[in-house]
Amino acid sequence: MAAPTAKVSRGWSGLALGVRIAVLRLPGLTQVRWSRYGPEYQDPQIDKEYYRKPLAQLTEEETYERELRKTQVIKAAPATKTSSVFEDPVISKFTNMMMKGGNKILARSLMTQTLEAVKRKQFEKYHAASAEEQATVERNPYTIFHQALKNCEPVIGLVPILKGGHFYQVPVPLAERRRRFLAMKWMITECREKKPRRMLMPEKLSQELLEAFCNRGPVIKRKHDMHKMAEANRALAHYRWW
Amino acid sequence: SLPPVLRFPCAVHQLLDPGRFSHLGTQAPQCPVAHLDNQVPTERTRAISRTLENDPAKHGEQHVGQHYNISIQELKTVFPHGLPPRFVMQVKTFNEACLMVRKPALELLHYLKNTNFAHPAVRYVLYGEKGTGKTLSLCHIIHFCAKQDWLILHIPDAHLWVKNCRDLLQSTYNKQRFDQPLEASIWLKNFKTANERFLSQIKVQDKYVWNKRESTEKGSPLAEVVEQGIMRVRNATDAVGIVLKELKRQSSLGVFRLLVAVDGVNALWGRTTLKREDKSPITPEELALIYNLRKMVKNDWQGGAIVLTVSQTGSLFKPRKAYLPQELLGKEGFDTLDPFIPILVSNYNPKEFEGCIQYYLENNWLQHEKAHTEEGKKELLFLSNRNPGLLERLCAYL
């Protein structure tokens, strides 16, 4: 979250460079997520290809950029961002959301077991299908994962707005990241709460992902319910002021 | 394009002459280079990762790193138990069972082909770090012996007999020992599936009385003892003991050849997690199954071979990093097994690694787009350190 720094007023000259002072962005709202890095800190460049380009092949802009980066301060790269070719930000975000109590090892193993379960189920379907249908069966667990989450994203959402002493559910267009968050949240809640007692998470998650990939299943239903509610409340759309 | 020819001379030879196998050494064959250029890439990858020679007896140095196929029918008869669970899942997913030919297994096959059946049985111990392929090498050997018509006595995992036993009965034969009816009956069922044809030929040489009403006469086939063990679960452990005793006695006569294959033999001399009713711990020799198995593993009989595996996975009270036979067997076990031939099973060499990756690529197991690139392969090599078990787990979710 890139929050604006406060103007350094007279009393604060003793602070070290780069340390952010706590600032209230809007009246009545406290900032809960901020980083200790100042605005001058640049994000780290993790991509290996960037560094492998031979110096002779760089354009003028790129050489200028490289020289500039040598003078700038750079944030430390988080432990979860690797330069692995197999890394996927969506998978990392989903794993973090599944994590409980900081147990990343368990969350990651559940994620890998889910991907493996999805792959094995699709392979079974592939072998059972006839030659024409085999071309339609998708066996890549990553495409299935991405497509399933994309299918679960709602287009429009509801926001409680206070007007005249009552809270009204007003339909509101959602930002891209809010939609992705809602899709992942619904998926995880669905798998945690509605699964049979002895079923493990990877099995249930793989089931739900495959159903969402085919636009069926409870998470898609929840998205449709959200859309229907928004459609029903469309008279309240005027309460939105942004 | 000389480099490809030099790098995979055996593979090219396979391509030209799948039926014939000659010892190639280091010279490149005199094949037309243009021929190789016209080959479709898939043919070449199949030549690296697969071989058409499905008989383990004919496997040689040139097949190292290549997979050979076992038909599903054969799999059901030869391996009713004993395959690692992840391998069983892989067989189910790919609809085919392919085993890689590796150096330790080839070494053992060479020794087995040149065994002198008049001498006492030689003990071979496969050891290595976790995930290097000891169990699958053992399965390769068992497949070879099954094809050569040996009698296979395969205990899939001796660790399962010393832990998590729900029902321990006091043995009827010897009051000091304990019976494990469930484990014994499961093992008897699988033993019957693997060795159907021998059970009717081998005749029991003693009379065995089960209880007041049932007994097995001298001269009746071994199948009756096995049936008795499967049907009367209370006598299953004793049935196993009888089977072991009879096979040991009669293999020395030369009627059949016996292969004793035990996976996780360090369980026989370790500690158990089983307790009596008064919570005092039970030592392995107080379990009748273990007691009889120890007699089997002694080299005082002729007419066969004993192939063993020591593993830390599944072992009790042993540190995770221990893999040497001395560490895992303990003093008692090592002294009992001494002398034995140790065979180290290590991680894949570059050729085997390449073969494994090609096999996965052929079966479309590696679905991630980046896994097909050189970068992806280098990363897999780095992450798995060429360890077969780790590589399999990595490729499962990629």
Image (cartoon, grey):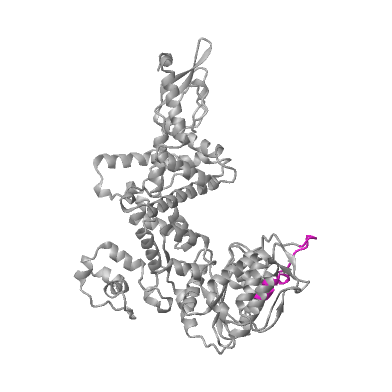
Q: Which image quadrant for residue B288?
A: bottom right
Seen from the viewer's position, the closer of residues B330 and A158 is: A158
Q: Where does residue B88 sit, x and y in percent of width and height?
A: 49, 61
Q: Where does residue B299 sit, x and y in percent of width and height?
A: 62, 83
Q: Where does residue B350 sit, x and y in percent of width and height?
A: 39, 66
Residue B280 is inside the magenta segment: yes
Give the side of residue B208 with respect to residue A13, left or right: right
Q: Is residue A218 above or below residue B254?
A: above
Instruction: Report the number of numbered marks.
Output: 0
Q: Where does residue A187 sit, x and y in percent of width and height?
A: 48, 37
Is residue B331 something that shows in the picture? Answer: no
Which quadrant is home to the N terminus of chain B?
bottom left
Image point 44% across, 30% down: which residue? A223
Q: Residue furthest top?
A: A164
Give the side of residue A28 with respect to residue A59, left or right: right
Give the side of residue A151 with respect to residue B224, left or right: left
Q: Which image quadrant for residue B122?
A: bottom right
Q: Residue furthest left?
A: B34
Q: Is residue B72 above or below residue B118?
A: above
Q: Is residue B123 above or below residue B350?
A: below
Is residue B47 something that shows in the picture? Answer: yes
Residue B45 is inside the magenta segment: no
Q: Residue furthest front?
A: B213
Seen from the viewer's position, the closer of residues B122 and B145 is: B145
Give the side of residue A79 with respect to residue A198, left or right: left
Q: Is residue B61 above or below residue B167?
A: below
Q: Residue furthest bottom?
A: B118
Image: magenta residue range: B276-293
